[in-house]
Structure formats: C-alpha cells, structure tokens
Amino acid sequence: MANKVFKMTAAGKAELEAERDYLTNEGRADIAEKLKVARSYGDLSENSEYEEARNEQDQMEARIREIEYQLKNAVIVESVDADDDTVTMDTVVSVVRKSDKAKLTYKIVDYTRSNPAEGLISDESPIGKALMGAKAGDTVTVEAPVGTIDFEIKKVKKEKKKTKAKK
C-alpha cells in the first residue's frame, strides 16, 4: 500500500516539527512525572491516577507517531506562487454564501493543520478544493455532504512569507 502524501507549506511543516519536539521532550517528561507520582499511591490495579496517566501517555505516543508519519510523507508546496488575488495555500478567503448571504472567512491550510471550528479548512476539503485557484469576484460551487452550496469570493488575502533576520 502506498503512503499518503501530505501537502503542506513550510510553515505547516515547521509547526508539526515544533509540536513533535514539544511532545517528545516536555510531553514525555510530564507524563513520566505523572506516572511516578501515581505509582507512589500504591496498588496499580485500583489506581485511577495511574490509569489516567497511562491513557494520556498512549494518546501522546499515538500523536507523535502520526506526526512523524506525516513529516516523513510531506511534500512542501509554496503558498504564494500564484497571483495575489488567487486562492492558494495559506490564503485567507472572505466569501458570501449565496443561499442566505452569510459572510464567512476561511484560511486554506494543509490537511495536518485543518480545524474547521477555527475557520482553518484543508485544501482537500470540498470547500477548500472549490476555492483553490479561484479569484476575488468568482463564484464557486461546492458539492458538500449537505448538498450544493454556491459561494461568491469577496476578498483574497495572502499571508506574507516570514523571513529570518540575519544575525
């Protein structure tokens, strides 16, 4: 079975690397301390603190493995190659849903950083796919699980590339 390719920007990859580093260093140390304290309470078979710490450790280790898999299979895409008014990765897009005139703002991000509750939508999601490559003034149609949705793109804003200051 072929590995899944994870498209991400350099910023997205850096965020994942930072999360992995935090979890493997501080996160593991915190869990080890929790386990040590919980063991000191005695009988592990009836020790809810120990069980909770073990569950937290399992979840953290699963997240570390997931991040390492994503980083291993990452393909870096540039976020600002296209015209300034074209939707690409790391673009903030203001749209109006035509059915009810609702004004929405999305940031198109890679799959690994998507969080629809915070307005971060993946370029692989139905809305993200429809918006990619479109420009301000365009109307896009999204085939979503809830049906067809038409959006008019009102504004496209690119994030500026961060440059490191020379020492």
Image (tube, grey):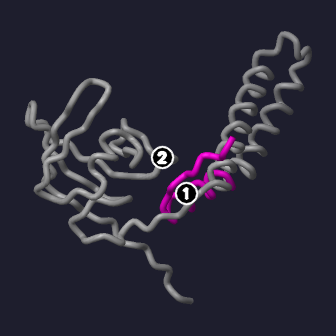
- Secondary structure at badge 1 equals helix
Amino acid at pointer 1: Glu
Q: Which residue appears at 64% of the width and 55% of the height? A: 71
What's the CA distance linking mark 2 and mark 1?
13 Å
Residue 15: mark in rendering:
1
- Residue at the bottom extreme? 167
Instruction: Give the residue at x 24% y 26%.
Output: 147
**Residue 158 as seen in the image, left or right of residue 47:** left
| Residue 13, horizontal then vertical, whole percent | 56, 59
In which quadrant of the rendered image does the N terminus lie? top right
Foreground residue among 81 and 46? 81
When asked about the image quadrant of residue 84, the answer is: bottom left
User: Residue 98 has which mark?
Assistant: none
x and y percentages locating residue 114 in the rendered image: 44, 44
| Residue at 48%, 46% in the rendered image | 111
Relative horizontal placement of residue 133, taking residue 40 as reference (left or right): left
User: Is residue 89 located in the magenta-colored stretch of the structure?
Assistant: no
Badge 2 local density, few (<14 within 10 Å), some, or many (20+)?
A: some
Q: Which residues are magenta?
A: 1-21
159 horizontally vs 25: left or right: left
Are the residues at dot 2 and dot 1 in contact (C-beta closer than 8 Å)? no
Disc 2 target residue: 111
Q: Position of residue 68 (x, y in %)?
A: 69, 50
Say what secondary structure mark 2 lies in. Answer: helix
